[in-house]
């Protein structure tokens, strides 16, 4: 990579991170990425510099992105018209593996947001929900097995709710923060390490299913874990960073080999000439194909909180929360605060979307302006993962609203709405994991 001239050392083509690629030559100097990095992501690592009569983007310190506080959230990629800042494109890697699998079984898991987000990118109305067509498309691309990350969203909720109950009952470290958003975890580890003990130890749904595929499924299918090539289809650029963590290579190999964003998937579907709208419905492959409504709302801001509250209530009282909806944490406000009654204990909960808003919420908690918070959710992307940094752009607020509404539609029409009641999750614990909150496969120690 060639450095910029003069005192700026940032490369002209910056691929230093696992997630984001910056091609300076494509930059038109509009400054939208600079604004997003500051006002939404709360990082301020980008700036514009003179380039003759124009301006070009670089990092504030003039160094590669990996040497800054970039949290890989991808908010910059959502506003960059000329694609100067984009996800690190790994579609070529995937195509090479599919063309020459070398005896490996190629599997993928699909995040809750993808079945919604991919639709408006491929000619269907915003808010459409097409998991069956999505599975068909992935089989045509060349995947041998397609699993549903909604299943492992339920697994994450079971673990996270169990941990919350344990922390409350044992007077552990509170407030507990969600840990499923890798950009948020990057923010904590890089800039707010005092919050590390407050992070839930539950893996993200990607991390859960990545581990499960190369352990439980490998055993069930009689496949050597090293002979499985596992891909995650995610609406998130930071997930590329997450799977490269050393914590997710505990047995000498990566649990998830590759992450492809929504935009990369759409690119592949179009490249292969697949008519998405005309595809038949194909079900997800067992044993990770069933999900509760709670798993579906995981991808909306406030959804992780709502799903966890449903299960925490059950673990404390032995009965289901009614009504099951937690309206206080729904909506697109930057910070939402509510209260739930857990076995007579009034528990204050808080939700922030966008790391800039999360920083504000944390300042208020630390200053005492926001008191007695027990459980807090943070997502880096406004609207949640359904509008994530790796998703196709929601060109209007109406599209964003339709995507979020679709997640709640899935929940409302689900026969099972609580993660702990998912029969495949119950069976998984009986078969492999034991008791919720104990299995080391589903937990992680943050840096």
Image: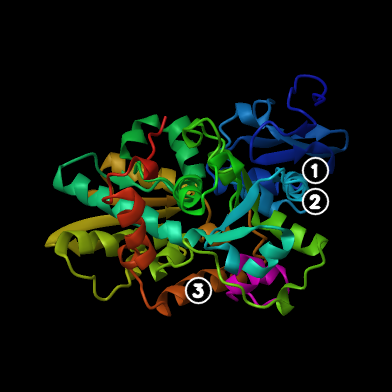
Q: Distance between the Cα atoms at labels 2 and 1? A: 7 Å
Residue 13 coordinates in the image, percent (x, y): 79, 33
In this view of the protein, which residue sits in the foreground, 397 or 206?
206
What residue sits right under mark 3 in the picture? 405
Q: Where is residue 249 in the image (x, y as percent from the top left)?
A: 51, 34
Q: Does the magenta stretch include residue 68?
A: no
User: Percent position (x, y) of residue 49?
Assistant: 76, 33
Q: Do the residues labelled 2 and 1 touch (CB within 8 Å)?
A: yes
Q: What element carries label 1?
A: loop
Residue 334 seen in the figure:
no
Give the residue pinned by disc 1: 27
Q: Vertically, is 135 above or below 380?
A: below
Q: First in sequence: mark 2 or mark 1?
A: 1
At horizontal 68% and vertical 53% (from top left) the residue drawn is 79
Instruction: Tell me, for residue 1, which label it has, or none.
Output: none
Residue 411 in the image: above or below residue 379: below
Q: Is residue 374 left or right of residue 386?
A: left
- Please give left or right for residue 140 compared with residue 150 in the image: right
Tell me the residue at 88%/33% (across/down): 52
Of residue 196 and residue 317, the one placed in the foreground of this image is 317
In the displayed image of the protein, which residue is found farthest to the top? Answer: 7
- In which quadrant of the rendered view does residue 24 lie? top right
Assign the N terminus to one quadrant of the image.
Answer: top right
| Residue at the far front in the pictured view | 222
Residue that carries the numbered disc 2 in the rendered image? 82
Q: Give the range drawn in magenta.
A: 116-134
Disc 1 or disc 3, which is closer to the eye? 3
Q: Position of residue 20 (x, y in %)?
A: 67, 41
Please identify the quarter of the rendering in which residue 136 is found. Answer: bottom right
What is the secondary structure assignment of the residue under circle 3? Answer: helix
Residue under the image location 73 percent in, 60 percent down: 141
């Amino acid at each position: 990579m060639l450095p910029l001239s003069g005192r700026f050392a940032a490369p002209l083509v910056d691929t230093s991170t696992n997630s984001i690629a910056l091609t300076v030559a494509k930059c038109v100097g509009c400054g939208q990425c600079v604004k997003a990095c500051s006002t939404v992501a709360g990082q301020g690592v980008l700036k514009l510099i003179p380039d003759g009569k124009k301006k070009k983007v670089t990092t504030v310190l003039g160094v590669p992105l990996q040497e800054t506080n970039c949290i890989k959230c991808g908010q910059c990629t959502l506003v960059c018209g000329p694609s100067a800042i984009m996800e690190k494109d790994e579609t070529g890697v995937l195509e090479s593996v599919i063309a020459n699998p070398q005896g490996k079984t190629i599997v993928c898991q699909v995040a809750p947001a993808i079945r919604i987000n991919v639709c408006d990118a491929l000619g269907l109305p915003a808010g459409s929900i097409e998991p069956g067509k999505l599975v068909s498309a992935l089989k045509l691309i060349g995947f041998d097995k397609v699993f549903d990350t909604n299943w492992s969203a339920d697994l994450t909720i079971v673990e996270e709710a169990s941990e919350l109950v344990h922390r409350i009952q044992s007077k552990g470290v509170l407030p507990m923060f969600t840990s499923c958003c890798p950009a948020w975890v990057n923010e904590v580890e890089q800039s707010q390490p005092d919050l590390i003990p407050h992070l839930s130890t539950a893996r993200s749904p990607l991390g859960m299913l990545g581990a499960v595929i190369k352990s439980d499924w490998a055993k069930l299918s009689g496949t050597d874990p090293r002979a499985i090539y596992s891909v995650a289809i995610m609406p998130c650029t930071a997930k590329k960073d997450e799977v490269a963590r050393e914590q997710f290579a505990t047995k000498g190999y990566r649990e998830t080999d590759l992450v492809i964003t929504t935009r990369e998937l759409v690119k592949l579907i179009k490249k292969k000439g697949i008519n998405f709208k005309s595809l038949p419905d194909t079900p997800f492959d067992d044993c990770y194909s069933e999900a509760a409504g709670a798993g579906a709302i995981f991808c909306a801001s406030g959804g992780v909180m709502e799903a966890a509250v449903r299960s925490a209530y059950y673990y404390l009282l032995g009965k289901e929360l009614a009504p099951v909806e937690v309206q206080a944490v729904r909506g697109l406000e930057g910070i939402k605060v509510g209260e739930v009654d857990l076995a007579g204990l009034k528990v204050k909960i808080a939700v922030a979307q966008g790391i800039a808003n999360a920083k504000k919420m944390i300042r208020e908690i630390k200053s005492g302006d926001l008191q007695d918070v027990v459980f807090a959710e943070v997502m880096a992307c406004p609207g949640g993962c359904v509008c994530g940094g790796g998703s196709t752009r929601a060109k209007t607020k109406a599209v964003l609203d339709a995507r979020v509404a679709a997640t709640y539609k899935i929940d409302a029409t689900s026969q099972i709405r609580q993660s702990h009641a998912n029969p495949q999750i119950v069976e998984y614990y009986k078969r492999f994991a034991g008791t919720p909150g104990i299995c080391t496969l589903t937990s992680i120690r943050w840096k």
